Image (spheres, rainbow, N blue to C red):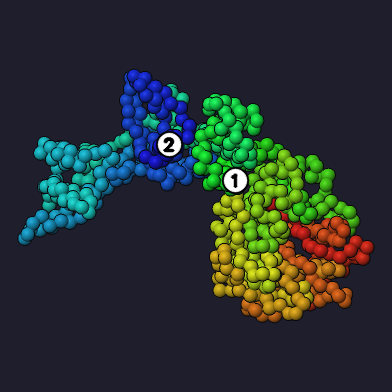
Amino acid sequence: NEAMLDEIGDDTVDFAPNFDGSQQEPTVLPAQLPFLLLNGCTGIAVGMATNIPPHNLGEVVEALIALIRKPELSDEKLLELVPGPDFPTGGEVLIGSGVRDTYLSGRGSIPMRGVAHIEEVQPGKGRHKRGAVVITELPYQLSKAGWIEKLAEQVNEGKITGIADIRDESDRDGMRVVVELRRDADPQRVLAELQRRTALQSNYGAILLALVNGKPVQLSLRQMLQEFLDYRELTLIRRTRHALKRAEDRLEVVEGLITALDALPRVIEMITAAPDAASAKASLQVHLDLSERQADAVLAMPLRRTRLVEGGDELVAQRTAAVRPNAELQRQRALEGLPSDGRLVIQADGQVKIVGPQLLGRLHLDEAAAAGDNPSPARLILPVAEQPAVLAFTDAGRVALLRWEFAGQQPGSLEKFLPEGMGGEQVVQLLPLPSGEAARGVSIGLLSSDGRFKRLPLEDFQELSGRAATVLKLKEGVSLQRVVICREGQELVVASSTGRMLRLAVNEANLPLMGRTAQGPVLMRLLPGESVVGAAAAAAEGSVLLVSRLGQLKRLAVGSLRRCQRGDLGQIGLRFQQRGDALVDLRDDRATVLALVLAEGRSLRLLAGDLPEEDSAGAGQQLALKAAGNVQELVPLILALE
């Protein structure tokens, strides 16, 4: 009942007068599932009839999801998802041309057969065992008592031979009808006779006829599922519009109450000075610029309520609650207004914008460039059409979904697209949330500035609401340093400012999955004056990228580092060629384009493929950066979702 009536009060369906015009009744129920298919339906009218068999809930829902994701889904795939009806009373459905014809044309004959087996039974004490056909399930809508009665008639008339007795041994454990055979009877032949001459095997005449916009239409399975999806989309739109209207009406009233609260002595004076309610209402509308609804709400509020809302906290909270239902609708409208071929671009300086492919091509952000006053390097360039979920992690150990959809209307800095209440927090990393097959076996690793590391399951990030969530509990003076996508079987490499590296296998023993409020174990013991600069997960035969403050760049083979335990000192992965140098960043080598962010807004871009892989003893290559300034950050360009 809930799935059929739950949304009926949200203006999801039209109402019409009943047969005598005394009441209003819904023209159709706002069903959240296609109950016509799930429960089945039988009906007859002049010149037409419908006979829809019941179906399995899981199979129908899987088919609906598949059609939502891929409307052009092939008939073969659809029939794999819904192989046939699911009759609740048991029996077998013989999958074949009958089911296929029914689902492709909307009409067909579906063969059904009861479940039977042959066994030996003891007719009575001291008697020899005999063969018997035991029926444990009957076809859909076939009465057990009626079937036994008709079978007995056919046996008595000699139409079916070889049967000695028929017994109904059904109990609380299930159906059991025993057809005892004569000693000279062939059990297989008798079973075949039962299937041929009785309703133990019969056909279900399916007609998928339903009303579409008030007209009877014979539908294929695909058409019936699509009609439900179209109808469900309409009810969701109407429900959302109804919620929006209620929120807007409530917002109007609350804003009027806040206006009156700010001028409460004046409001009391106007009300007490007015000779009647109509005059008080008109005075409020004129002097406070209130609408009629707002003035009515002010007059309806008892004077004792003003004490409860002193300071406006309650009204402000109500206004926030009234605005909240609009957020998802506004986001959807913003998405619909974006160009289908647009790209989400987030730059190293924190600017978020939506650009077309032509403008993006002119910026050459995915090409190498010498050190200079280049455009701020891009961290992410993702297709808008895929609607990527981008997570923003802050130094305070919190994460929120970046509402980048609104950048199409008004580009701006990262802070503009984060939830309220995150002011003063610095975004340390952006992460496109993996989905689909790419999300299989993925966990999210968090490295803090005191050398602690913990992993969280990806599921903790897939259901984030519009608010920021704390995912790492930090001590005073400690901050979130790096976020790492981890997969079982990879190697985690953590680096310190002195060029020291720590390699650990990504598994439950070394890096256990933990809760949101945990700090995580210490991976790297820091020496005096040393700091953690980064971490990356890569295959054992893969590599990571290192860069120092003075421009020493290296692709380090992960396999050249020895595996360590938590708390070990590790080994040197980069030996500096210049005195006073220090490691500033470590990244994985997935990106094809790398950018070095330099002092005073300068940058350079290079192709990752141009860097040779070296072992831990290699020195890498020294970039000439004297005029350009020190390296502040290594920015790998992400061009696709994980």
- Which amino acid, mark 2? Ala
For marks 1 and 2, give the one nearer the viewer: 1
Between residue 69 and residue 626, name the one nearer to us: 626
Q: If the image is split into quadrants, where does the C terminus sit?
A: bottom right
> Residue drawn at (67%, 58%), measured in percent from left and top?
393
Q: Secondary structure at mark 2?
A: loop
Specify the label residue 31 is tagged with. Answer: 2
Against 562, is 131 above or below? above
User: Relative to residue 429, is residue 160 drawn left or right?
Assistant: left
Q: Earlier in the sequence, mark 1 or mark 2?
A: 2
Q: Is residue 69 visible?
A: no
Between residue 106 and residue 376, name the one nearer to us: 376
Alpha-carbon distance for marks 1 and 2? 41 Å
Where does residue 153 sit, x and y in percent of width and height?
12, 37
- Residue tagged 1: 312
Where does residue 473 sit, x and y in percent of width and height?
61, 66
- Which amino acid, mark 1? Gly
Callout 1: few (<14), some (14-19), or many (20+) C-alpha neighbours within 10 Å? some
Where does residue 22 sit, x and y in percent of width and height?
35, 21
* Quadrant in the picture for residue 357: top right
